Image (cartoon, rainbow, N blue to C red):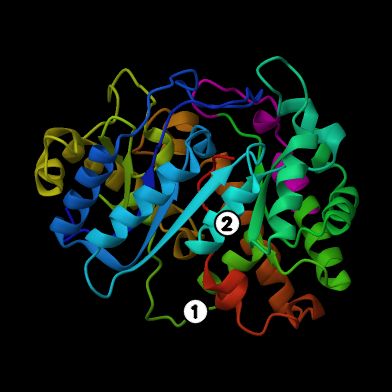
Protein backbone atom coordinates (compact mmCIF):
# COMPACT_ATOMS: atom_id res chain seq x y z
CA UNK A 1 0.00 0.00 0.00
CA UNK A 2 1.56 3.34 -1.04
CA UNK A 3 2.05 5.76 1.85
CA UNK A 4 0.66 8.26 2.15
CA UNK A 5 -2.17 8.58 -0.39
CA UNK A 6 -2.44 11.78 -2.40
CA UNK A 7 -6.03 12.90 -2.99
CA UNK A 8 -6.25 14.75 -6.30
CA UNK A 9 -9.92 14.34 -7.17
CA UNK A 10 -13.04 14.23 -5.03
CA UNK A 11 -16.21 13.11 -6.83
CA UNK A 12 -19.40 13.98 -4.96
CA UNK A 13 -22.88 12.69 -5.74
CA UNK A 14 -25.34 15.40 -4.69
CA UNK A 15 -28.15 13.04 -5.74
CA UNK A 16 -28.34 9.73 -7.64
CA UNK A 17 -31.45 11.02 -9.43
CA UNK A 18 -31.32 12.00 -13.09
CA UNK A 19 -34.06 13.96 -14.82
CA UNK A 20 -33.59 12.15 -18.15
CA UNK A 21 -33.19 8.54 -19.32
CA UNK A 22 -30.34 8.08 -21.80
CA UNK A 23 -30.41 4.76 -23.62
CA UNK A 24 -26.75 4.05 -22.81
CA UNK A 25 -26.83 5.10 -19.15
CA UNK A 26 -24.93 2.81 -16.75
CA UNK A 27 -26.24 4.34 -13.49
CA UNK A 28 -28.17 1.76 -11.46
CA UNK A 29 -29.93 4.19 -9.08
CA UNK A 30 -31.00 7.07 -11.30
CA UNK A 31 -34.58 6.92 -9.92
CA UNK A 32 -33.35 7.46 -6.36
CA UNK A 33 -34.29 10.98 -5.21
CA UNK A 34 -32.22 11.02 -2.04
CA UNK A 35 -29.95 14.06 -1.65
CA UNK A 36 -26.66 14.82 0.04
CA UNK A 37 -27.21 16.84 3.20
CA UNK A 38 -24.92 19.65 4.25
CA UNK A 39 -24.02 17.53 7.28
CA UNK A 40 -22.68 14.91 4.86
CA UNK A 41 -20.77 17.56 2.91
CA UNK A 42 -19.17 18.84 6.10
CA UNK A 43 -18.35 15.32 7.27
CA UNK A 44 -16.77 14.57 3.89
CA UNK A 45 -14.45 17.55 3.97
CA UNK A 46 -13.60 17.06 7.63
CA UNK A 47 -12.40 13.55 6.73
CA UNK A 48 -10.54 14.69 3.63
CA UNK A 49 -8.85 17.71 5.21
CA UNK A 50 -8.08 15.96 8.51
CA UNK A 51 -6.31 13.17 6.63
CA UNK A 52 -3.60 15.56 5.46
CA UNK A 53 -3.57 13.70 2.16
CA UNK A 54 -4.80 16.43 -0.19
CA UNK A 55 -2.70 17.30 -3.19
CA UNK A 56 -1.83 21.02 -3.46
CA UNK A 57 -4.74 21.31 -5.89
CA UNK A 58 -8.00 19.46 -5.21
CA UNK A 59 -10.59 19.01 -7.96
CA UNK A 60 -14.13 18.58 -6.64
CA UNK A 61 -16.46 17.13 -9.27
CA UNK A 62 -20.23 17.14 -8.69
CA UNK A 63 -21.47 14.26 -10.80
CA UNK A 64 -24.01 11.46 -11.31
CA UNK A 65 -27.01 11.63 -11.67
CA UNK A 66 -27.88 15.17 -12.75
CA UNK A 67 -26.18 17.61 -10.35
CA UNK A 68 -28.32 20.61 -11.34
CA UNK A 69 -31.40 18.90 -9.91
CA UNK A 70 -30.22 20.48 -6.66
CA UNK A 71 -31.04 24.21 -6.23
CA UNK A 72 -28.56 27.00 -6.89
CA UNK A 73 -28.80 28.05 -3.24
CA UNK A 74 -27.79 24.55 -2.13
CA UNK A 75 -24.52 24.81 -4.06
CA UNK A 76 -23.85 28.36 -2.92
CA UNK A 77 -24.15 27.23 0.69
CA UNK A 78 -22.05 24.12 0.03
CA UNK A 79 -19.27 26.06 -1.71
CA UNK A 80 -19.12 28.62 1.09
CA UNK A 81 -19.00 25.92 3.77
CA UNK A 82 -16.22 24.08 1.98
CA UNK A 83 -14.19 27.26 1.44
CA UNK A 84 -14.46 28.02 5.14
CA UNK A 85 -13.08 24.58 6.01
CA UNK A 86 -10.25 24.40 3.48
CA UNK A 87 -6.64 24.50 4.73
CA UNK A 88 -4.65 27.61 3.95
CA UNK A 89 -2.90 27.42 0.59
CA UNK A 90 -5.07 24.66 -0.86
CA UNK A 91 -6.15 25.36 -4.45
CA UNK A 92 -9.67 23.98 -4.69
CA UNK A 93 -11.79 24.02 -7.82
CA UNK A 94 -15.36 22.85 -8.29
CA UNK A 95 -16.72 21.30 -11.51
CA UNK A 96 -20.06 19.93 -12.64
CA UNK A 97 -21.02 17.55 -15.42
CA UNK A 98 -24.58 18.27 -16.56
CA UNK A 99 -27.01 17.44 -19.34
CA UNK A 100 -27.53 21.21 -19.63
CA UNK A 101 -31.32 21.16 -19.58
CA UNK A 102 -31.70 22.97 -16.26
CA UNK A 103 -29.16 25.75 -16.86
CA UNK A 104 -30.59 29.19 -16.13
CA UNK A 105 -29.17 32.71 -15.67
CA UNK A 106 -28.95 31.97 -11.94
CA UNK A 107 -26.79 28.92 -12.63
CA UNK A 108 -24.55 30.99 -14.91
CA UNK A 109 -24.09 33.55 -12.15
CA UNK A 110 -23.11 30.78 -9.72
CA UNK A 111 -20.62 29.29 -12.19
CA UNK A 112 -18.98 32.66 -12.76
CA UNK A 113 -18.93 33.67 -9.09
CA UNK A 114 -17.27 30.45 -7.93
CA UNK A 115 -15.24 29.74 -11.08
CA UNK A 116 -16.95 26.38 -11.55
CA UNK A 117 -15.76 24.17 -14.39
CA UNK A 118 -18.73 23.15 -16.52
CA UNK A 119 -19.09 20.11 -18.73
CA UNK A 120 -22.21 19.59 -20.84
CA UNK A 121 -23.24 16.26 -22.32
CA UNK A 122 -24.03 16.85 -26.00
CA UNK A 123 -23.83 14.10 -28.61
CA UNK A 124 -23.84 16.28 -31.71
CA UNK A 125 -26.65 17.45 -34.02
CA UNK A 126 -30.26 16.88 -33.00
CA UNK A 127 -30.67 13.71 -35.06
CA UNK A 128 -27.77 12.07 -33.23
CA UNK A 129 -28.32 13.55 -29.78
CA UNK A 130 -32.05 12.79 -29.65
CA UNK A 131 -31.55 9.18 -30.67
CA UNK A 132 -30.16 8.29 -27.25
CA UNK A 133 -30.49 11.25 -24.85
CA UNK A 134 -34.18 11.19 -24.07
CA UNK A 135 -36.55 12.56 -21.46
CA UNK A 136 -38.26 10.12 -19.15
CA UNK A 137 -41.24 10.43 -21.47
CA UNK A 138 -39.16 9.38 -24.49
CA UNK A 139 -38.74 12.79 -26.13
CA UNK A 140 -35.51 14.31 -27.38
CA UNK A 141 -33.50 16.65 -25.17
CA UNK A 142 -31.43 18.45 -27.81
CA UNK A 143 -33.39 21.72 -27.87
CA UNK A 144 -33.24 22.25 -24.12
CA UNK A 145 -29.58 21.26 -23.94
CA UNK A 146 -28.74 23.80 -26.63
CA UNK A 147 -30.77 26.43 -24.78
CA UNK A 148 -28.53 25.80 -21.78
CA UNK A 149 -25.37 26.04 -23.88
CA UNK A 150 -26.49 29.34 -25.38
CA UNK A 151 -27.06 30.71 -21.88
CA UNK A 152 -23.53 29.69 -20.88
CA UNK A 153 -22.17 31.43 -23.97
CA UNK A 154 -24.19 34.59 -23.47
CA UNK A 155 -23.02 34.85 -19.85
CA UNK A 156 -19.37 34.23 -20.70
CA UNK A 157 -19.16 30.91 -18.84
CA UNK A 158 -16.34 28.70 -20.09
CA UNK A 159 -17.40 25.09 -20.73
CA UNK A 160 -16.58 21.91 -22.58
CA UNK A 161 -18.84 19.25 -24.04
CA UNK A 162 -18.62 15.48 -23.74
CA UNK A 163 -20.02 13.67 -26.76
CA UNK A 164 -20.81 9.98 -26.70
CA UNK A 165 -19.87 8.57 -30.09
CA UNK A 166 -22.22 5.98 -31.51
CA UNK A 167 -22.00 4.00 -34.73
CA UNK A 168 -23.68 6.87 -36.59
CA UNK A 169 -21.48 9.70 -35.37
CA UNK A 170 -18.28 7.68 -35.78
CA UNK A 171 -18.94 7.68 -39.50
CA UNK A 172 -19.23 11.45 -39.84
CA UNK A 173 -16.30 13.38 -38.31
CA UNK A 174 -16.75 16.26 -40.75
CA UNK A 175 -20.43 16.61 -39.88
CA UNK A 176 -19.62 16.56 -36.16
CA UNK A 177 -16.99 19.26 -36.62
CA UNK A 178 -19.34 21.44 -38.66
CA UNK A 179 -21.95 21.15 -35.94
CA UNK A 180 -19.55 22.22 -33.18
CA UNK A 181 -18.22 25.08 -35.30
CA UNK A 182 -21.72 26.37 -36.07
CA UNK A 183 -22.65 26.11 -32.38
CA UNK A 184 -19.52 28.00 -31.27
CA UNK A 185 -18.28 25.07 -29.19
CA UNK A 186 -14.48 24.90 -29.02
CA UNK A 187 -13.67 22.44 -26.20
CA UNK A 188 -14.67 18.86 -26.97
CA UNK A 189 -14.29 15.44 -25.35
CA UNK A 190 -15.31 12.13 -26.89
CA UNK A 191 -16.50 8.97 -25.18
CA UNK A 192 -17.19 6.01 -27.45
CA UNK A 193 -20.40 4.31 -26.33
CA UNK A 194 -19.14 1.54 -24.07
CA UNK A 195 -20.34 -1.43 -22.08
CA UNK A 196 -20.42 -0.46 -18.43
CA UNK A 197 -22.55 -1.43 -15.48
CA UNK A 198 -25.91 -2.67 -16.72
CA UNK A 199 -25.45 -1.25 -20.22
CA UNK A 200 -24.07 -3.45 -22.98
CA UNK A 201 -22.98 -1.74 -26.17
CA UNK A 202 -23.02 -3.68 -29.42
CA UNK A 203 -20.66 -1.06 -30.88
CA UNK A 204 -18.10 -1.74 -28.16
CA UNK A 205 -17.93 -5.39 -29.17
CA UNK A 206 -17.16 -4.70 -32.84
CA UNK A 207 -13.81 -6.08 -33.97
CA UNK A 208 -12.96 -3.04 -36.08
CA UNK A 209 -13.89 -0.37 -33.54
CA UNK A 210 -10.30 0.67 -32.79
CA UNK A 211 -9.65 1.43 -36.45
CA UNK A 212 -12.98 3.21 -36.82
CA UNK A 213 -12.31 5.46 -33.87
CA UNK A 214 -8.75 6.13 -35.04
CA UNK A 215 -10.06 7.22 -38.43
CA UNK A 216 -12.68 9.45 -36.80
CA UNK A 217 -10.28 11.10 -34.37
CA UNK A 218 -7.54 11.57 -36.95
CA UNK A 219 -9.91 13.26 -39.38
CA UNK A 220 -11.63 15.37 -36.71
CA UNK A 221 -8.33 16.52 -35.18
CA UNK A 222 -6.76 17.46 -38.51
CA UNK A 223 -9.81 19.27 -39.81
CA UNK A 224 -10.29 21.11 -36.51
CA UNK A 225 -6.67 22.25 -36.37
CA UNK A 226 -6.74 23.35 -39.99
CA UNK A 227 -9.91 25.37 -39.41
CA UNK A 228 -8.53 26.81 -36.16
CA UNK A 229 -11.95 26.85 -34.54
CA UNK A 230 -11.43 24.20 -31.83
CA UNK A 231 -8.97 25.02 -29.04
CA UNK A 232 -9.20 21.81 -27.02
CA UNK A 233 -9.77 18.17 -27.99
CA UNK A 234 -9.37 16.11 -24.83
CA UNK A 235 -8.22 12.95 -26.55
CA UNK A 236 -5.30 14.85 -28.11
CA UNK A 237 -4.57 17.83 -25.87
CA UNK A 238 -4.84 15.99 -22.57
CA UNK A 239 -2.65 13.18 -23.92
CA UNK A 240 0.13 15.39 -25.28
CA UNK A 241 1.66 16.35 -21.89
CA UNK A 242 1.72 12.65 -20.95
CA UNK A 243 3.67 11.77 -24.09
CA UNK A 244 5.94 14.81 -24.40
CA UNK A 245 7.32 15.03 -20.85
CA UNK A 246 10.71 14.74 -19.15
CA UNK A 247 11.79 11.16 -18.50
CA UNK A 248 12.10 11.77 -14.78
CA UNK A 249 8.41 12.66 -14.41
CA UNK A 250 6.40 9.52 -13.68
CA UNK A 251 2.97 8.95 -15.14
CA UNK A 252 0.46 9.06 -12.26
CA UNK A 253 -2.88 7.33 -12.76
CA UNK A 254 -5.15 8.44 -9.93
CA UNK A 255 -7.62 5.63 -10.64
CA UNK A 256 -5.22 2.84 -9.65
CA UNK A 257 -4.01 4.07 -6.26
CA UNK A 258 -6.06 4.12 -3.05
CA UNK A 259 -7.70 7.51 -2.53
CA UNK A 260 -6.06 9.08 -5.57
CA UNK A 261 -9.72 9.62 -6.30
CA UNK A 262 -12.27 9.69 -3.48
CA UNK A 263 -15.89 9.11 -4.46
CA UNK A 264 -18.70 9.98 -2.02
CA UNK A 265 -22.35 8.99 -2.43
CA UNK A 266 -25.28 11.13 -1.31
CA UNK A 267 -25.51 9.18 1.96
CA UNK A 268 -21.79 9.50 2.71
CA UNK A 269 -20.68 6.08 1.48
CA UNK A 270 -17.15 6.15 0.10
CA UNK A 271 -15.46 4.30 -2.73
CA UNK A 272 -12.14 4.89 -4.45
CA UNK A 273 -10.45 4.18 -7.76
CA UNK A 274 -12.89 4.58 -10.70
CA UNK A 275 -15.82 6.90 -9.87
CA UNK A 276 -18.24 4.64 -11.75
CA UNK A 277 -17.77 2.00 -9.04
CA UNK A 278 -19.91 4.09 -6.72
CA UNK A 279 -23.32 2.43 -6.86
CA UNK A 280 -22.27 -0.65 -8.83
CA UNK A 281 -22.39 -4.16 -7.39
CA UNK A 282 -20.44 -7.32 -8.12
CA UNK A 283 -20.72 -10.88 -6.83
CA UNK A 284 -17.11 -10.95 -5.61
CA UNK A 285 -16.70 -7.42 -4.28
CA UNK A 286 -20.26 -6.61 -3.19
CA UNK A 287 -20.73 -2.83 -3.44
CA UNK A 288 -17.14 -1.44 -3.53
CA UNK A 289 -17.86 0.72 -0.47
CA UNK A 290 -14.86 1.14 1.84
CA UNK A 291 -16.57 3.17 4.57
CA UNK A 292 -18.84 6.11 5.32
CA UNK A 293 -17.78 9.66 6.17
CA UNK A 294 -20.14 9.74 9.15
CA UNK A 295 -18.56 6.73 10.82
CA UNK A 296 -15.01 6.21 9.48
CA UNK A 297 -11.88 8.28 9.05
CA UNK A 298 -9.97 7.95 5.80
CA UNK A 299 -7.07 6.14 7.55
CA UNK A 300 -9.59 3.63 8.92
CA UNK A 301 -11.03 3.12 5.45
CA UNK A 302 -7.55 2.76 3.96
CA UNK A 303 -6.69 0.00 6.44
CA UNK A 304 -10.05 -1.76 6.10
CA UNK A 305 -10.57 -5.16 4.53
CA UNK A 306 -12.58 -3.84 1.57
CA UNK A 307 -9.92 -1.35 0.51
CA UNK A 308 -7.12 -3.85 1.01
CA UNK A 309 -8.81 -6.43 -1.19
CA UNK A 310 -9.62 -3.94 -3.94
CA UNK A 311 -6.11 -2.54 -3.90
CA UNK A 312 -4.50 -5.98 -4.00
CA UNK A 313 -6.39 -6.98 -7.14
CA UNK A 314 -6.04 -3.57 -8.83
CA UNK A 315 -2.29 -3.54 -8.12
CA UNK A 316 -1.99 -7.00 -9.66
CA UNK A 317 -3.68 -5.69 -12.80
CA UNK A 318 -1.38 -2.67 -12.90
CA UNK A 319 1.69 -4.91 -12.74
CA UNK A 320 0.31 -7.02 -15.58
CA UNK A 321 -0.12 -3.86 -17.62
CA UNK A 322 3.42 -2.78 -16.76
CA UNK A 323 4.83 -6.12 -17.88
CA UNK A 324 2.83 -6.55 -21.08
CA UNK A 325 1.72 -3.19 -22.48
CA UNK A 326 3.91 -0.84 -24.50
CA UNK A 327 1.55 2.04 -23.67
CA UNK A 328 2.04 1.77 -19.92
CA UNK A 329 4.19 4.91 -19.72
CA UNK A 330 1.29 7.11 -20.87
CA UNK A 331 -1.51 5.16 -19.16
CA UNK A 332 -0.20 3.96 -15.83
CA UNK A 333 -2.39 0.89 -15.53
CA UNK A 334 -5.81 1.49 -17.05
CA UNK A 335 -9.26 2.10 -15.56
CA UNK A 336 -10.29 -0.50 -12.96
CA UNK A 337 -14.01 -0.27 -13.70
CA UNK A 338 -13.39 -1.16 -17.35
CA UNK A 339 -11.13 -4.07 -16.41
CA UNK A 340 -13.91 -5.38 -14.18
CA UNK A 341 -16.67 -4.83 -16.73
CA UNK A 342 -14.81 -6.05 -19.83
CA UNK A 343 -12.46 -8.70 -18.42
CA UNK A 344 -14.32 -9.83 -15.33
CA UNK A 345 -11.67 -8.73 -12.83
CA UNK A 346 -9.46 -5.89 -11.63
CA UNK A 347 -6.40 -8.16 -11.81
CA UNK A 348 -6.38 -8.12 -15.63
CA UNK A 349 -4.62 -5.99 -18.22
CA UNK A 350 -5.71 -4.25 -21.42
CA UNK A 351 -9.29 -3.47 -22.33
CA UNK A 352 -11.16 -2.08 -25.30
CA UNK A 353 -11.48 1.13 -23.27
CA UNK A 354 -7.66 1.27 -23.11
CA UNK A 355 -7.41 0.86 -26.86
CA UNK A 356 -9.74 3.78 -27.52
CA UNK A 357 -8.74 6.26 -24.82
CA UNK A 358 -4.99 5.59 -24.59
CA UNK A 359 -3.65 3.66 -27.57
CA UNK A 360 -5.46 5.39 -30.42
CA UNK A 361 -4.57 8.97 -29.36
CA UNK A 362 -0.98 7.95 -28.55
CA UNK A 363 -0.52 6.34 -31.97
CA UNK A 364 -1.91 9.38 -33.77
CA UNK A 365 0.27 11.83 -31.84
CA UNK A 366 3.45 9.78 -32.22
CA UNK A 367 2.80 9.34 -35.93
CA UNK A 368 2.38 13.10 -36.32
CA UNK A 369 5.53 13.81 -34.28
CA UNK A 370 7.59 11.36 -36.34
CA UNK A 371 6.54 13.11 -39.53
CA UNK A 372 6.91 16.62 -38.01
CA UNK A 373 3.30 17.03 -38.94
CA UNK A 374 2.03 20.64 -39.35
CA UNK A 375 -1.02 19.70 -37.31
CA UNK A 376 1.23 19.80 -34.22
CA UNK A 377 2.81 23.15 -34.99
CA UNK A 378 -0.18 25.02 -33.57
CA UNK A 379 0.48 23.56 -30.10
CA UNK A 380 2.86 25.85 -28.22
CA UNK A 381 2.36 24.39 -24.73
CA UNK A 382 0.18 21.28 -24.48
CA UNK A 383 -0.16 21.61 -20.71
CA UNK A 384 -1.79 25.03 -21.07
CA UNK A 385 -4.78 23.74 -23.04
CA UNK A 386 -8.12 24.64 -21.51
CA UNK A 387 -6.39 26.87 -18.94
CA UNK A 388 -4.21 23.95 -17.86
CA UNK A 389 -7.19 21.91 -16.68
CA UNK A 390 -8.31 18.88 -18.60
CA UNK A 391 -12.07 18.29 -18.52
CA UNK A 392 -13.45 15.40 -16.54
CA UNK A 393 -11.58 12.22 -17.42
CA UNK A 394 -14.23 9.79 -16.28
CA UNK A 395 -16.00 7.73 -18.90
CA UNK A 396 -19.37 8.92 -17.73
CA UNK A 397 -21.13 11.45 -19.92
- Membership of 206 in magenta stretch: yes
Residue 230 is tagged as none
| Residue 34, image x, y percentages | 38, 23
- Above or below, comparing residue 384 to residue 266 in the picture: below
| Residue 341, image x, y percentages | 47, 29
Mark 2 or mark 1, whichever is nearer to me: 2
Assign the C terminus to one quadrant of the image: top right
Please name whichever residue, 40 or 285, is drawn nearer the observer in this view of the structure: 40
**Mark 1 = which residue?**
245
Name the secondary structure under disc 2. helix
Q: Quadrant of residue 109?
A: bottom right
Query: Dot 2, how many residues are within 10 Å of its Cα: few (below 14), some (14-19), or many (20+)?
Result: some
| Residue 313, image x, y percentages | 27, 39
Residue at position x 55%, y 76% in the image: 383
Please name whichever residue, 354 or 44, is drawn nearer the observer in this view of the structure: 44
Residue at position x 73%, y 73% in the image: 368
Task: Tell me if residue 331 can be seen.
Answer: yes
Q: Which residues are magenta?
A: 196-215
**Mark 2 = which residue?**
109
Task: Tell me if residue 6 can be seen.
Answer: no
Of mark 2 and mark 1, the one earlier in the sequence is: 2
| Residue 99, image x, y percentages | 63, 38
Name the secondary structure under disc 1. loop
- Above or below, comparing residue 239 to residue 241 in the picture: above
Please name whichever residue, 3 or 54, is drawn nearer the observer in this view of the structure: 54
In contact (CB < 8 Å): disc 2 and disc 1: no
Q: Quadrant of residue 264?
A: top left
- Above or below, comparing residue 157 to residue 369 in the picture: above
Amino acid sequence: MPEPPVIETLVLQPTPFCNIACSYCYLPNRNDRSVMTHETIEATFVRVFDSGWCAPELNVIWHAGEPLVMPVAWYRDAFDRIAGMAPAGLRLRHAVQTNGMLISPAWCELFRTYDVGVGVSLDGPAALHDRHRLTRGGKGTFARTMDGIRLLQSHGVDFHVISVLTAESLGDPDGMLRFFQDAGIDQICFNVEESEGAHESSLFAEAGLRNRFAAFLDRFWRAARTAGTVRFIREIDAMLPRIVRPDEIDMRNEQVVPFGMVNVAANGDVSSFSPELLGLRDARYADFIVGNVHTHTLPEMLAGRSMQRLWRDIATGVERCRATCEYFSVCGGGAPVNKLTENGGFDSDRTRFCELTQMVPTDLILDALERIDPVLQQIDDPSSASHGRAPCQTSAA
